[in-house]
């Protein structure tokens, strides 16, 4: 059973196809009270933890999400305000490995700060989904586009490949990008697409 909103966990499972991997879920909670939603609601990493026996770190701002998730998750659950804290301090504290199989970066108002803080020289990833919410971009809210373009340029310069650009969600539009390292791109480059609904991605 997959849990994520736009098939991120399904994509990670397909692209990496491994047991005992490692994930980093930044902004792991939801905007909904967990006591009125199913366990794992919109989680990008619960499937990987429970079905593929991955380990990792889940970080969220909301203490209620961390507390309630302790009932059914075994990974490191961290409550942190990433506007105030540096993501690298958390990774060091919890002994994050230098190679991370899957990163989910969806941390709303802290997204640009987390991206800029993140030590990409030390921590490499195989697959990353990064929310940009370009569907919200307007002439009066160009920061969405500017941030996204900066992230894309930076990741390209680091040698990563944009596998799916502008993954789209019904009722919203373009919400995020999917990035892979060169090894995964050599294997799965045929999936490369742009402006595609999540349900139509061939995984």
Image (cartoon, grey):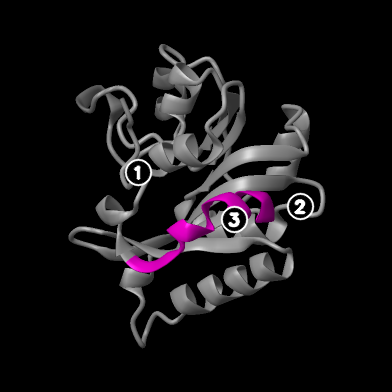
Q: Position of residue 37 (x, y in %)?
A: 23, 28
Let me know if residue 86 appears in the view: no
In this orientation, which residue lies closer to the viewer: 76 or 178? Answer: 178
Q: Would you call the spot at circle 3 few (<14 residues within 10 Å), some (14-19), or many (20 or more)?
A: many
Q: Which mark is residue 7?
A: 1
Residue 1 located left or right of residue 8:
left
In this orientation, which residue lies closer to the viewer: 1 or 17? Answer: 17
Q: Which residue position is annotated with label 2?
A: 119
In this orientation, which residue lies closer to the viewer: 147 or 46? Answer: 46
Q: Nearer the viewer, mark 2 or mark 3?
A: 3
Q: Is mark 2 in CB contact (under 8 Å) with mark 3?
A: no
Which badge, 2 or 1, is on the more N-terminal residue? 1
Magenta region includes residue 10: no
* Residue 88, picture quadrant: top right
* Residue 153, picture quadrant: bottom right
User: Which residue does the image show at 46% across and 77% down from the upper left?
Assistant: 145
Q: Position of residue 111 (x, y in %)?
A: 54, 57
Inter-mark Cα distance, 2 to 3: 22 Å
Q: Nearer the viewer, mark 3 or mark 1?
A: 3
Magenta stretch prevailing secondary structure: helix
Q: Which residue position is annotated with label 3?
A: 185
Q: Position of residue 178 (x, y in %)?
A: 49, 56
Which structural element holds mark 3? helix
Q: Position of residue 151 (x, y in %)?
A: 60, 68
User: Which residue does the image show at 76% across and 28% down from the upper left?
Assistant: 95
Q: Write the start and end of the magenta stretch as one range.
A: 182-195
Q: Nearer the viewer, mark 2 or mark 1?
A: 1
Which badge, 3 or 1, is on the more N-terminal residue? 1
């Amino acid at each position: 059973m997959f849990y994520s909103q736009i098939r991120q966990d399904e994509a990670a499972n397909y692209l990496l196809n491994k047991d005992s991997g490692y994930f980093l879920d930044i902004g792991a909670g939801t905007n909904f009270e967990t006591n009125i939603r199913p366990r794992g609601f919109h989680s990008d990493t619960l499937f990987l933890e429970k079905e593929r026996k991955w380990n990792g770190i889940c970080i969220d701002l909301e203490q209620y999400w961390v507390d309630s998730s302790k009932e059914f998750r075994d990974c490191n659950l961290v409550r942190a305000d990433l506007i105030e804290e540096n993501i690298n301090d958390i990774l060091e504290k919890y002994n994050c490995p230098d190679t991370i199989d899957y990163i989910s970066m969806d941390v709303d108002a802290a997204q640009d700060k987390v991206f800029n803080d993140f030590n990409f020289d030390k921590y490499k990833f195989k697959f990353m989904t990064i929310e940009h919410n370009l569907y919200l971009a307007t002439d009066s809210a160009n920061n969405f586009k500017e941030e996204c373009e900066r992230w894309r340029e930076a990741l390209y310069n680091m040698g990563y490949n944009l596998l799916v650009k502008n993954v789209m969600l019904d009722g919203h539009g373009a919400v995020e990008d999917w990035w892979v390292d060169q090894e995964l791109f050599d294997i799965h480059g045929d999936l490369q697409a742009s402006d595609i609904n999540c349900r139509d991605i061939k995984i």
